[in-house]
Image (spheres, grey):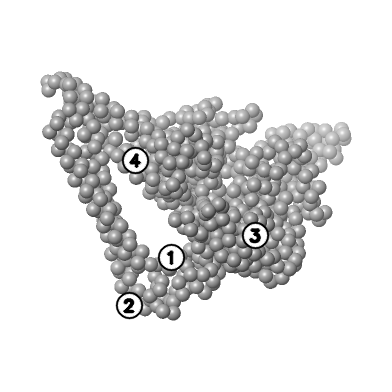
Amino acid sequence: MAFVQFSRVSLAFGNRDILDSVSLNLQAGTKAALAGANGSGKSTLMKVLSGEIQCDSGERAIQKDTRVSYLPQSGIVHSGKTLRDEIDSAFSRGYELLRAFEELGDQLAHESADSPRLDRLISEHHDIGQALEDSQWHRRSALAEQTLYGLGFAPSDLDRNVSEFSGGWQMRIALAKILLERPDILLLDEPTNYLDLEARTWLETWLREYPGGFLIVSHDRFFLDSTINEVYELFSGQLKRYPGDYSHYEQVRQVELASLIKRYEEQQEEIAKTEDLIRRFRYKATKAAMVQERIKKLEKMERIEIPESLKKIHFTFPPAPPTGRLVVTLSGLTKGYGERVVIQGLDAVIEKGERLVVVGRNGAGKSTLLRMIAGVDTDFSGSIIPGSGVLPGYFSQDNAEILNGPERIIDLLEGEAPLEMIPRLRDMLGAFLFRGDDVYKQINVLSGGEKSRLALVRLLLKPINLLILDEPTNHLDLHSKDVLLEALRSFGGTVIFVSHDRGFIEGLSTRVLELTRSEDGSPSQVRSFPGDYRYYVERLEREALLVQGDTPNAAPVAAAPTDNAIASPLSRDEAKKRKAERRRLEREEERLLADIAEAEETKGQKEILLATPQVYSDAIKSRQLGADIERLEKHIAELTGLWETVLSQMEEQL
């Protein structure tokens, strides 16, 4: 079985132990998360596992022929190829196997029947052929497109040069390549940072079905609960395993940390009393022996350390100035880029106290809508009318770009914060991962993620009553997300936000505005759903059982963005019949897809065989194989036609 194993591995940077006698075993079937506070060394551990960084001591063992693929958080840039060609390079192992298969086939063609090497060559040829089949090299085009579409790319992207894609999409390309390599062990460091909800859901499904092993770092609790069954926590250089999903790990860890914090507080109290006693009697000759004893006791004491990330942090917003009931009214809102209209004729009303989440695939217009509401984008038709007394505050990832200069973080915020907020600045900064001496960093040395977090803190200091937040959790860890979520829940104003973190959305949203991107380039369809995100998901699931136009009085679900746009339900008998018919169609779809896959696999095997020298040099064999391949192509086309018919029938059932 393929595996990567650590045994008592240690690594230090200067006088800091990142890994201290860590042991870990990853093998096929491992579905694990790597947890730990920011700066605890998670990315370093991943790099040591991948072989990028050498450890100071200990052993890293890897089973022969085990393939390990590592995806870092960022920094991968592709250029010089189309997306189709770049993704094709993920199948390099398949090409290598094919060349080896052909070379052995050539040797076999020239080997005599009584050669002592014949049996060995035949065995090797068979093994390589099996490995080539297992790699699904013959299905590379279909697999590549399936993976790219799952991660959010469109068919029109396939022939674009990869250099045209932005940083987040560059990382999606890197993720697609790693998934298509199908290694034995996957090491994924924050793959969800640049994925939208739909792509995250697709990746969840892929990981659940993946037969290999993986270790993943992510700050998306819902994503982790959906994919993993064990957690390894890196804490003060030590690695500890917790069986179960991420939520279970957090529950167990909470009890452990409560005990740790209690022992820490008791020790701090003991240290304070001892130090006070030493100060009082240090210069009394009659107490010299006792003082020396206490000093030695302090020196020998093993101090309990509590990382900054574990200290309880809470903050609240400045009081939100009062507003009227209607906070924002959108009327006939239309926005386009060149000939492409993204949003057309949007009517909506946002009321005081709502937490409105805007959802939809990338390109549907979510960020565009938020920019228009915030007043950043004024190039549109229709109207956006703010209510009485509305004071908006807008956050997006672009906010970080305007932050620069030699000023220190703490000085910048003290100069901008209301007087009553100044005593709470360090707590707020701590909540957003600026801890200890970080508050004295100059702004011009901050990373993009740090600037983004600082921009969010600056916004939250202002007395506003309408928060417009575009991906506020992108650079936050789970602890910081929880702190922000708690503060937003208690915020006295109104919130409009976009997020790709399902747990954050479920915890905050009270209403959902859905933008559905059309594949034909027409404007996004808009629907409004009262209730939280869970209700929205349940509503989508129920729509398969609702009539869309069969009943005269039924209002089409997608007809208008009103809260009562729900189609009339079927009668009980009709619903049962439709449900049974849909199940039949789903079974038929599964059978057809299995038949198509089998036919494609057989065709691929025959194409590989046709490429071997002993076949293509034989005219009779090559003609026979060519005819077989042609028949299979026709059969695949027929099966595909039947599959498309079934899909149409399934769509009619909706």
Q: Measure how far apart labels 3 and 2 are at the Cα level.
A: 47 Å
Q: Earlier in the sequence, mark 3 or mark 4?
A: 4
The reply, left or right, for residue 341 in relation to residue 203 is: right
Q: Nearer the viewer, mark 1 or mark 4?
A: 4
Dots 3, 2 in contact, CB < 8 A: no
Residue depth check, mark 2 versus mark 4: number of the one nearer the observer: 4
Whole-number angstrom distance, CA of label 2 to CA of label 4: 45 Å
Cα separation between marks 1 and 3: 30 Å
Q: Return the x and y of residue 339 as percentages of the image width and height.
A: 53, 53
Instruction: Residue 499: give x, y in percent of width and height.
Output: 57, 54
Q: Nearer the viewer, residue 484 or 325?
A: 325
Mark 4 highlights which residue? 140
Quadrant location of the N terminus in the rendered image: top left
Q: Is 119 positioned to the left or the right of 9 in the image? A: left
Q: CA distance from mark 1 to mark 4?
A: 32 Å
Tell me where residue 371 appears, x and y as whole percent.
63, 55
- Given residues 337 and 486, the one toward you in this image is 337
> How many residues crowd mark 1 within 10 Å: few (<14), some (14–19), many (20+)?
few
- Percent from the top left, x then y, of residue 262? 66, 50
Mark 1: amino acid: Glu
User: Which residue corresponds to the image point at 77% horizontal and 47% vertical from the top-left?
Assistant: 413
Q: Secondary structure at mark 2?
A: helix
Q: Nearer the viewer, mark 3 or mark 2?
A: 3
Per the image, the residue denoted by label 2 is 573
